[in-house]
Image (spheres, rainbow, N blue to C red):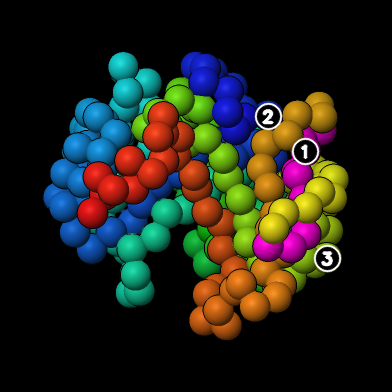
Amino acid sequence: RGGDGVEVDEDPEGTPAWCDLGTPDLDAAIGFYSALFGWEVEVGPPETGHYSMARIRGRDVAGLADQQGPGPAAWSTYLAGDDLDVTLGRAVGHGAQVLVGATDGSQAGRFAVVADPGGAVVSFWQAAEHRGAGRVGEPGCVLWSELTTRAVDESLEFYRDVVGLTSVLGSSTRGDYYELHRADGRTVAGLMSMSGDAWDDQVPNSWMAYFAADDPVATAARCV
């Protein structure tokens, strides 16, 4: 999925299908990302936590909403699954802690949130009317999803057994790096081993979403 630069209509199991931001200041977040990426944002009603859809040329690319719990603002990654109940059962059976049980997202689909065996938070998504991101791999859209974790072996086993992601070991300047492949062989995510002095002890294991930019350095400067 990373780097496609295409419209997307379906996400096989294990694909990072969606990401959204929970924030204590939704108006500020919408203003920031709209200016940065050119998003058009439709703000949702209060009963949904003002869940808002960000779009580029009419296609959904990400969600933003009122933060539902304490802590810093954070992006969440959703992995696609064919049957949420089955996926959630596998996750629990392989050591996940359920944070939000299976929940209906109106007519859009169903989701659940867990902490994987390394403590990284990840969501699972069973699509109905909302398939997930409709545009990826171009500026302002998700380009890549990556798990950074100290629990490498446990995480590789967990995502293999729960959503069928197999791994291939590569390398990076910061340590071991694994490409994660779904059942059809397509590379859809990465796993970075948080080993060595490059990682502060206070940085938690987590999933990260990378957004595409024509010029990352200039885009970062615009953030400031």
Q: Secondary structure at mark 3?
A: helix
100 w.r.t. 222: above or below: below
Where residue 143 sits in the image (x, y, percent)?
Answer: 52, 35
The residue indicated by pointer 1 is 181
| Kind of residue sitting beneath label 3 | Asp
The residue shown at (52%, 21%) is 5
| Kind of residue sitting beneath label 1 | His
Where residue 183 sits in the image (x, y, percent)?
Answer: 82, 33
The residue indicated by pointer 2 is 12
Q: Sequence-wise, which precedes: disc 3 or disc 2?
A: 2
| Kind of residue sitting beneath label 2 | Pro
Crowd tier of the residue under label 1, counting other residues whose Cα lies within 10 Å: few below 14, some 14–19, many 20 or above: many
Where residue 66 sits in the image (x, y, percent)?
Answer: 25, 56
Proximity of marks 3 and 2: CB atoms separated by less than 8 Å:
no
Out of 18 and 191, give the one closest to the viewer: 191
Q: Which residues are magenta?
A: 174-183
**For the residues marked 3 and 1, what is the alpha-carbon distance in whole angstroms?**
16 Å
Q: Is residue 220 left or right of residue 12?
A: left
